[in-house]
Image (spheres, grey):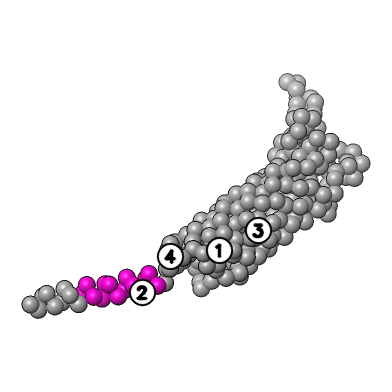
Amino acid sequence: MRHLRLLRSALLISFLSAQGFANDNPGDSSTPGPITRGFYFGVTSSHFSGESCTLWGSRFGGNAGMYTNFPLTDLLGLQLDIGYVTKGAQIEEAFDRDGLLIRPAADVRLDYVQFAVLTRLGQPRSGYRDEYHLRPKLLGGFALNTRVKTRVHGLSEDWEHSFQDTELSLVFGGGFDHSFWGKRAVTFEFRFDLGLSDVYADWKNNTAHFLVGMTL
């Protein structure tokens, strides 16, 4: 009888603990969470696409920005970004068999202030406990890029004034957040920035972003 009472007590404690965990993780995904803000920085790998720019290859650059996420539900949010993004491309020099230079190196660096409006889809908070799990997310939307600086090497200086001042791009990607202290979280993201408008002739900017950040 004593062992039976202990078993009943253990089952009762387990049941109450399970109820408490359920209360911490409600199944309703319609309730939005709090507004979150953060910053990020990282590297970019950018190149031109178009029929008349086949010689151009990728170049690396930098990226830094801030964001605010407005949750619409526990699953879906609207994220606004503002950042400083480096794009462009380069041509590597080429030599013939005799070691003579047949194609000089060239480099184009385009610096933009980027304004992005993104839809953010994440795993609901009701499905896990933040302190133990990563929270994956998907991002998609559009960005308006305003050119603030142009640097060219190995080309005519007139090229600095030949590129369009604004550029529209499609942004999509994903990543995950990991909570480490209260509402603070470390963020990791990969984004692809697909150019929708020409920056020069039929050239478009395509950029991959590798980002690390933190919520505030």
Q: Work out whether residue 144 or residue 20 is closer to the camera in this orientation and state it.
A: 20
What residue is shown with label 3?
A: 41
Q: Where is residue 183 in the image (x, y as percent from the top left)?
A: 53, 71
Mark 4, Cα crowd under 10 Å, few <14 / some 14-19 / many 20+, is few
- Between marks 3 and 4, how big is the CA–CA gap? 34 Å
Q: Earlier in the sequence, mark 1 or mark 3?
A: 3
Circle 3 SS class: strand
Mark 3 crowd level (few <14, some 14–19, many ≥20, 10 Å Cα): many
Amino acid type of the residue that numbered disc 2 sits on in the rendered structure: Gly
Query: What's drawn in magenta, residue-wise?
Result: 10-23
Quadrant showing the N terminus: bottom left
Q: What element carries label 1?
A: loop
Residue that numbered label 2 is attached to: 20
Left or right relative to 123: residue 51: right
- Mark whose residue sits in front, 3 or 4: 4
Circle 4 SS class: loop
Residue displayed at 55% across by 68% down: 33
Q: Which residue lies furthest to the left in this view?
A: 1
Q: Position of residue 197 (x, y in %)?
A: 78, 42
Q: Distance between the residues labelled 4 and 1?
A: 13 Å
Name the chief secondary structure element in magenta.
Answer: helix
Which residue is tagged 4?
A: 27
